[in-house]
Image (tube, rainbow, N blue to C red):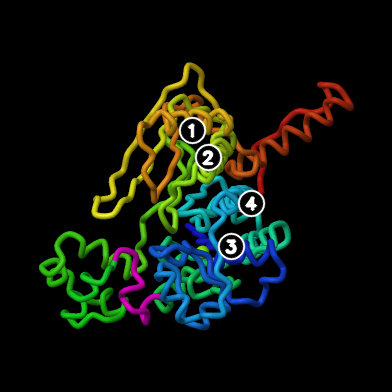
Amino acid sequence: MTTILHADMDAFYASVEQRDDPSLRGQPVIVGGLGKRGVVCAASYEARRFGVRSAMPIAKAHRLCPKGVFLPPRMSQYARISADVREIFYRFTPLVEPLSLDEAYLDCSGSLRLFAGARSIAEAIRAAIRNELSLPVSVGAGSGKLVAKIACARAKPDGLLLVDEHDTDAFLRPLPIAEIWGVGPSTEKRLHALGIATIGQLADFDTNRLERALGSWATVLQGLARGEDLRTVEADRGRKSYGEENTFPEDAVDADLIDAMLLAHAETVARRLRHDARKARTITLKWRASGAGVEWRLSTRSQTMAEASDDGVVIARVAAQLWRAEAEHPPIRLLGVQVTNLDGDRPVQLGLFRSEEEVRNEALNKALDQIVTRFGTGAVRRGGRPQG
Ligand SMILES: [Mg+2]
């Protein structure tokens, strides 16, 4: 059985601020761009009670919550903690797909037996993040990405919701169709026009009629509604590239901020490379410039090194050189570091995640080795296949 977890830190940036400064605990904390064009990046649950939400213009947040504590984001601090969170995920499975600094899918199908089931994995992850990083995280679990993600949203804040495979239909059917991944306002409108408001109604709808209305997208959508979510967790292992990027809440121009973010991204990328025992030769810097009246454009610059590296400082140095080599340094909204041209394509063997048979064999081999060490090679002979 496939078991996917969706883990999402609660009000991540705001929680980090409340953790690092105890006087902010219990306060409505709003992290975001403080300038005129700034937006809210994160709002603590105390601030959400006033209606403050992420992506809202900061001016509106000020009107809704005039007594709020407004803070500029400390992106490099969040990136560092994000890397620590990922290290915790990797204790439970190598199949981790990060979605952003504070969110990831984990495919735990292969480690269910080792850790005594999905619930104990989810509880152990929550406890580790709580005890080691003093931060709240919510976890949803289910047989596919869609169920796991919706379950996680329902578990918030600081909760856990596990949807058993047999309960998937009962869980999904009453939900509004907008909960389905990929259903935006325009698809929602078209579905409403067909009289479809819930996931259950979508699941039961005549497929041919749905195809006439939505095209080939219809079957995917109906599959999701029926709990047939075939999307797999795209882990780093086997990847051709590793990357990390962030969006700034307002135009970033400060050279120190850009250097700090490049280093944070490079170190995260380097950790993931080392985790998978790989090294990269090509470093790509990417950024999106912003400017009044100018369409935001994505730019990339790359450099290939003589020797492959898994060192964050080396990767950051190359990325910073690429940035300095630019004739102009416009204000930017997005900054990223990506590495490609990888060595070490052979996937690493992680003892914990091999097949049960391999694990059994290793235990057996170890036991045999110990006996042999004590009593000499004549002492044992391996019998039939180990059972169990
Ligand atoms: Mg979050």
- Circle 1 crowding by C-alpha within 10 Å: few under 14, some 14–19, many from 20: some
User: Mark 4 highlights which residue?
Assistant: 88
Across and down, in percent, residue 312 comes to: 57, 33
Across and down, in percent, residue 131 comes to: 73, 61
Q: Amino acid at mark 2?
A: Asp
Q: Is residue 263 visible?
A: yes
Q: Verify whether residue 341 appears in magenta.
A: no
The residues tagged by marks 2 and 1 sit, at their Cα atoms, a distance apart of 7 Å
- Residue closest to the eye, 82 or 33: 33
Decide which of tag 2 and tag 1 comes sooner along the chain: 2
Decide which of tag 3 and tag 1 comes sooner along the chain: 3
The residues tagged by marks 3 and 1 sit, at their Cα atoms, a distance apart of 42 Å
The residues tagged by marks 3 and 4 sit, at their Cα atoms, a distance apart of 16 Å
User: Mark 2 highlights which residue?
Assistant: 259
Tag on residue 320? Answer: 1
* Residues tagged 2 and 1 counted as in contact (Cβ below 8 A): yes
Callout 3: SS: helix
Callout 2: SS: helix
Q: Amino acid at mark 4?
A: Ile
Magenta span:
172-182
In the image as oriented, which residue stretches furthest toward the top?
Answer: 306
The residues tagged by marks 2 and 4 sit, at their Cα atoms, a distance apart of 27 Å
Q: Main secondary structure of the magenta part?
A: loop
The residues tagged by marks 3 and 2 sit, at their Cα atoms, a distance apart of 40 Å
Q: Amino acid at mark 3?
A: Ala
Q: Amino acid at mark 1?
A: Ala
User: Mark 3 highlights which residue?
Assistant: 118
- Looking at the image, residue 378 sits to the left or right of residue 236; the answer is right
Q: Is residue 141 visible?
A: no
Q: Is residue 6 above or below residue 94?
A: below
